[in-house]
Amino acid sequence: QVQLVESGGGLVQAGGSLRLSCAASGSIFSIVTMGWYRQAPGKQRELVANIRLDGGSTFYADSVKGRFTISKDNAKNTVYLQMNSLKPEDTAVYYCQALAWRNYWGQGTQVTVSS
């Protein structure tokens, strides 16, 4: 089993920044990738960014390229999402995800960007 605990959401004005953190515990050795998804009201959950734990290769959705950066701290078993130049359309619940032998999800953290 893998447990994920997120932190760092909140309310920010457009153009501002937030950093999300996701701390993993449990069967850490089984995790291949970790990432962030988001779900806005009335919309499907979408992948924002992910990172491989063994090499650090990353993926970003087109909508966040150049504004968001995903990173990891293996010593802390933590993945971060640095979000800059935030836009109102980034408003959503952000979920941390870990891919091991199955998907694991965090509880979600609300990010609200005001215009």
Image (spheres, rainbow, N blue to C red):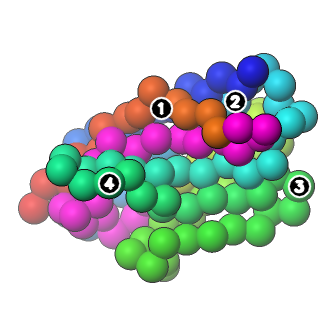
Counting residues from the start of the chain, the first of labels 1 and 4 encountered is 1
Front disc: 3 or 1: 3
Q: Residue at left 70%, top 30%?
A: 24
Front disc: 1 or 4: 4
**Residue ID for mark 1:** 7
Q: Secondary structure at mark 4?
A: loop
For marks 3 and 4, give the CA distance.
29 Å
Q: Are marks 3 and 4 in contact (CB under 8 Å)?
A: no
* Position of 83 relative to 92 (above/below): below
**Residue ID for mark 4:** 44
Counting residues from the start of the chain, the first of labels 2 and 4 encountered is 2
Counting residues from the start of the chain, the first of labels 2 and 1 encountered is 1
Task: Name the amino acid, label 3.
Answer: Asp
Q: Residue at left 52%, top 50%?
A: 36
In x, y percent, where is residue 74? Answer: 82, 42
Number of other residues with Cα within 10 Å of mark 4, as a class: few under 14, some 14 to 19, many 20 or more = few
**Residue ID for mark 3:** 54
Q: Quadrant of the C terminus?
A: bottom left
Residue 70 sits in which quadrant?
bottom right
In x, y percent, where is residue 67? Answer: 44, 72
What residue range appears in magenta?
82-102
Task: Name the amino acid, label 4.
Answer: Gln
For marks 2 and 3, give the CA distance.
15 Å
**Residue ID for mark 2:** 24
